[in-house]
Every structure is written in structure tokens, then in C-alpha cells.
Amino acid sequence: ARESAMVQMLEQLPQLCREDARFLDRLGSLEFVTTASGRVSRPWELYDPSVGELQELLEGGDFYPSQAFTRPDLMSALIRLGLQTGLDRYGVVKVAKSIAAMPQSDAERITCRARSFVRFLDTRLADLASERYSLAGAGRMAAFGFHSLV
């Protein structure tokens, strides 16, 4: 019931924004998107499941909106609200933590994900260290107690 109400709200987002200019900003800070694992999150805490690069790095239902939110029109609205389409420093920390938390009994899967992660870092380290990423992720990282990685 809650999830369908949130989907209906996103369907009406243009109208709601016309009625209240601050609605979009307020909504982006609320936990209202159900994840594939059933948790409720803010849009900016989640990632676009259609981005192939992210699929290799982010495994599990806590990273993505539930199936109910994956229609193209709803994904577009979630992106406007901050849904991530790439990894910033905060996302890199989340990936590292998710790999570290994997059960040791699944060594092959850990190795595969760790290799994908190292490849990503190897190709994106300069971008992650740039000022643009430093400023973009600083607020979210501070909110979760993280400090600069560089």
C-alpha cells in the first residue's frame, strides 16, 4: 500500500511541483523509495539499476529501487530527486563495505566483485580525486561520518 502510494505520488510529481515550488527539494530528502530488499531509502542513497557499470559493482537489493519504481517515467523522476547514475566517493565506500561484508564462504564471488571494483578504481581514480567529486559527495559523506578519502 505504501509503495503504491509513493508510485502514484511520483506519477503526479509535475503537478505537485507546480502547486509547491519547494516540493521537489523536500521530497528528495525523505525516505520514501522502497528498495529491492524492502528497506525504505532516500532517492540519493540509491542507484539506477539500468547502468551496467553499477550492476558489476553494486550487488544486492539495498542499492536499487524496488521493481515498482523502475518504469522509465518513475526512474526519470527519481533521477531528478537524486538517484545516482554513477559512483562518487560515498558510493565507493559503500561498494567497499558491501564487498567486505560478503560471506567468506563465497570466495569466487568476492574475487569477481573485488576485481571489478579495482578495475573501476583504476579507471576512475583521477575523477574521484577531482574537485568536482570532492564537493559533490562531501555533504552526503559528512552526514554518514565519512571524511575525505584523498
Image: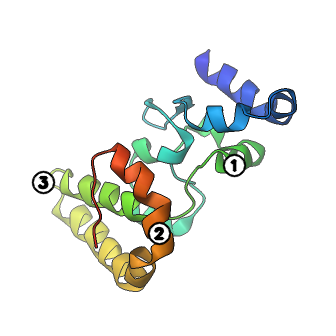
Q: Dividing the image into 4 quarters, which one contains the C terminus?
A: bottom left
- Check whether the beta carbons of the residues at disc 2 and disc 3 lie within 8 A of each other: no
Distance (Cα) linking label 2 and label 3: 35 Å
* Marked residue nearer the N-terminal end (2 or 3): 3
Query: Measured along the vertical axis of the image, is residue 37 above or below residue 126?
Result: above
Looking at the rendered structure, the secondary structure element under dot 3 is loop
Query: At x 22% / y 63%, what residue is drawn?
Result: 110
- Residue 88 lies, in percent from the top left, at 44, 64
Task: Say the numbered circle drawn on residue 105.
Answer: 3
- Residue 53 lies, in percent from the top left, at 50, 69
Q: Amino acid at mark 3?
A: Ser
Left or right: residue 137 versus residue 118 is right
Please name the residue that numbered disc 1 is placed on: 80
* Marked residue nearer the N-terminal end (2 or 1): 1
Looking at the rendered structure, the secondary structure element under dot 2 is helix
Distance (Cα) linking label 3 and label 1: 39 Å
Query: Measured along the vertical axis of the image, is residue 135 above or below residue 140?
Result: below
Res. 62 image quadrant: top left
Query: Measured along the vertical axis of the image, is residue 24 above or below residue 60?
Result: above
Res. 70 image quadrant: top right
Please name the residue that numbered disc 2 is placed on: 133
Few, some or many C-alpha atoms within 10 Å of disc 2 (few <14, some 14-19, many ≥20)?
some
- Residue 125 lies, in percent from the top left, at 37, 81
Q: Amino acid at mark 1?
A: Arg
- Residue at the top extreme, as displayed: 1
- Check whether the beta carbons of the residues at disc 2 and disc 1 lie within 8 A of each other: no
Query: At x 45% / y 79%, what residue is drawn?
Result: 127
Q: Amino acid at mark 2?
A: Tyr
Looking at the rendered structure, the secondary structure element under dot 1 is helix
